Image (spheres, grey):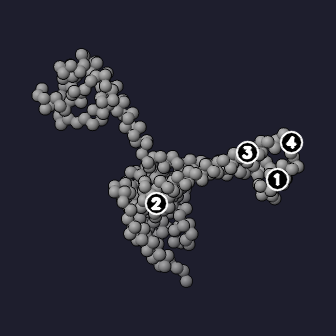
Amino acid sequence: MNKKDMGQAWFYQLDPNDDLSGSVAINDGYCSSPHDWPSLAIEYGYASTPAEYYSNLHELTFKAAQKFASELTKTPDRQISHAIRTVDDYSRIENELSTRLSEWIGDYVGISQDIPSSLAILSNQYENHNLTEHIFSLHDQLISISSKREQLVSFIESEMPNIAPNLEQMAGPLLAARLISLAGGLEKLAKKPSGTLQVLGAENALFAHLRGHATSPKHGVIYTHEHISKSPLHLRGNLARAFSGKLSIAARIDYYSGNLNPELHSDLLKKIDEIKSRGVRK
């Protein structure tokens, strides 16, 4: 085998004990035609037997896959997906514990009082009660969860203009982050048709429709945006289609170029105004 062809071998000029360089060679390697690599590895001195060659190849391939997976999970859009999901988890837990706290306090002071006033009454009238410590502890945990949720929201608001500037400008940071999370990443969101983006977050309703048990959903999580939620019911379908169409374009621009295009947002606002003016009922 000539030196040019040998240069295509992933083990060329590679120390068998250098796992890091080996995994990089596996990941970056390319060959235009097949060869008897085990025999060549023995001839070159990289391995002494075919079994040793395949053992090294297996080990380095596994490490290359680990390295690729590790890099994939550390991408900014992946991290922002974790952040928005944690915000939603915090909100759910906060609502559940707040309800539990209100019911617990209500057993002592009634349900007509707000929580701060109820806690003041509880502190004065049941100071030595053995359960008040747990009630106040639950209240402190609620304050802590609320604070952590707000900190995460601030983090998302500060990071989204860097991750997806067009999507963030059009949808707002939290909705933009939620769309990326639901799609499984910015790349996957950019490759989805606008019709799919339109119903992200409404999968249960969509599956019910496909089974013939419900009407087709007009929108998913994008409903939370004021363009749709604060608009008349009879316009929401058209508005959702227009909104998702522009969001789909924004996601593609963000993924493939990352440059802010203010005209895209202006076009959306014009389209929204047009639909609303057309749909005014007299």
Secondary structure under tag 2 reads: helix
| Image coords of residue 38 (percent x, y) | 22, 22
Secondary structure under tag 1 reads: helix
**Where's the C terminus, which quadrant?**
bottom right
The residue that disc 1 covers is 120
Please state which of residues 226 and 152 is positioned toward the viewer in this rendering. 152
* Residue located 28% across and 18% down the image: 51
* Residue located 77% across and 42% down the image: 134
Q: CA distance from mark 3 to mark 4?
A: 15 Å
The residue that disc 2 covers is 168
Q: CA distance from mark 2 to mark 3?
A: 35 Å
Q: Amino acid at mark 2?
A: Glu
Tags 1 and 4 touching, CB below 8 Å: no
Q: CA distance from mark 2 to mark 1?
A: 42 Å
Q: Residue furthest left?
A: 2
Label 2 or label 1, whichever comes before in sequence order: 1
Tags 3 and 4 touching, CB below 8 Å: no
| Image coords of residue 101 (percent x, y) | 75, 49
Secondary structure under tag 4 reads: loop
The residue that disc 4 covers is 129
Q: CA distance from mark 1 to mark 3?
A: 15 Å
Tags 2 and 4 touching, CB below 8 Å: no
Q: Residues within 10 Å of mark 2 (few under 14, many from 20)?
A: many
Label 1 or label 4, whichever comes before in sequence order: 1
Q: CA distance from mark 2 to mark 4?
A: 50 Å
Q: Amino acid at mark 4?
A: His
| Image coords of residue 30 (percent x, y) | 22, 36
Q: Amino acid at mark 3?
A: Leu
Could you say which disc has been placed on residue 256 in the image? none
The residue that disc 3 covers is 138
Horizontal side of residue 137 vs 240, given as left or right: right
**28 in relation to 140, above or below:** above
